[in-house]
Image (spheres, helix red, strand yellow):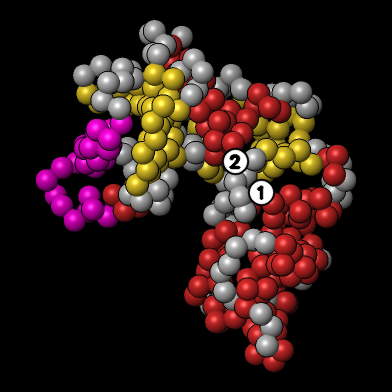
Amino acid sequence: MKIPDYFISCDWGTSNFRLRLVETETLNVLVEHKTDQGVKVVYQKFLKQNEIGQTKFFKNYLESQINNLDEHHKAGLVIAAGMASSNIGMKELPYGEIPFNEQGDGLHWEILPFKENLNIVLISGVKTETGMMRGEEIQAFGLAKYLESYQSGILILPGTHSKHINYTKGQFDSLKSFMTGEVFELLSRNSILSNSVEKCHWINKRHDAFKQGLEIGFSGELSANLFSIRARHILNDANKKDNFYLLSGMLIGDELSYLKNTDQTVFLAATEPFYSMYKLALETILNTTQVICFGDKVLEKALLIGQKKIIQLHAK
């Protein structure tokens, strides 16, 4: 198969949907379109009807959104990563296996007919005996070009379920998953702590509270100190916005605590505010020369690099 001049990058997560028309050679994004119709929302709409099968229902939504892109494009493929290949997505695909490498060994994908001159390459996730991910593996696949000058290290991809992926000589060979983001949402919105925290922007004024939380998380005393957030508010009239970042620091510190004595290089790839928060946390317990950081622009590019690699493998 000839590599197309353009492709449509589809990033279909649990909560959000994004299409980008991409020039294959340069990876320049020509048009971008976003909605809040993540896989979870579309799946609930599918369940409320019984006329169309699940794959067709998702294809219909995808087609309706592609119409928002430049109608003059000649894209030959839609490359779909993320939750689109889950059991609540377009079509459930079995997970690939860890280890996987920068040549694509271990990854799994399937080609779905879509419309005239346009097919979907649906990418599955990867798994170990104790963990799994969908979407992050393509980011890691794309980030491999930035890691190739290092022999080994740990790649951290923060998020609702943060992923720590071990990298050794071009191969990603193990995975740890942390429910840091989800636990934060549960505690800050649905627990007794919800009345003692207030969401706010990440600014210098909140750094001291965050660092205090990190110390607690790093010490292994997370559970014993969670209720102190409420006590600080009720007994000491502590600022709710400070408490928000105190809780953040506790959870992130707990996630990263196993790295305190590591001599490995740690790669961080994240968007703001996670980039700044995790960078500060890592540089608190590690030598700054051990911490290699990639911001949102690199992370955004990495997804496209990973998708392009899939196209190249498909074309062989």
Q: Is residue 259 magenta?
A: no
Q: Which residue is mark 1?
A: 275
Residue 200 in the image, given as x and y percentages of width and height: 58, 67
Crowd band around label 2 with a 10 angstrom C-alpha radius: few (<14), some (14–19), many (20+): some
Crowd band around label 1 with a 10 angstrom C-alpha radius: few (<14), some (14–19), many (20+): some
Q: Are marks 2 and 1 in contact (CB under 8 Å)?
A: yes
Residue 236 in the image, given as x and y percentages of width and height: 72, 89
> For this view, does 183 lie left or right of residue 66?
right
Residue placed most toward the observer, 172 or 245: 245
Q: Secondary structure at mark 2?
A: helix
Which mark, residue 296?
2
Q: Residue at x 14, y 49 (%)?
A: 50
Q: In the rendered image, which quarter is residue 226 located in? A: bottom right
**Chain part drawn in magenta:** 43-69
Q: Is residue 44 magenta?
A: yes
Q: Quadrant of the N terminus?
A: top left
In three-dimensional space, the C-alpha distance between marks 2 and 1, rounded to whole angstroms, equals 8 Å
Kind of residue at badge 2: Asp
> For this view, does 7 lie left or right of residue 312?
left
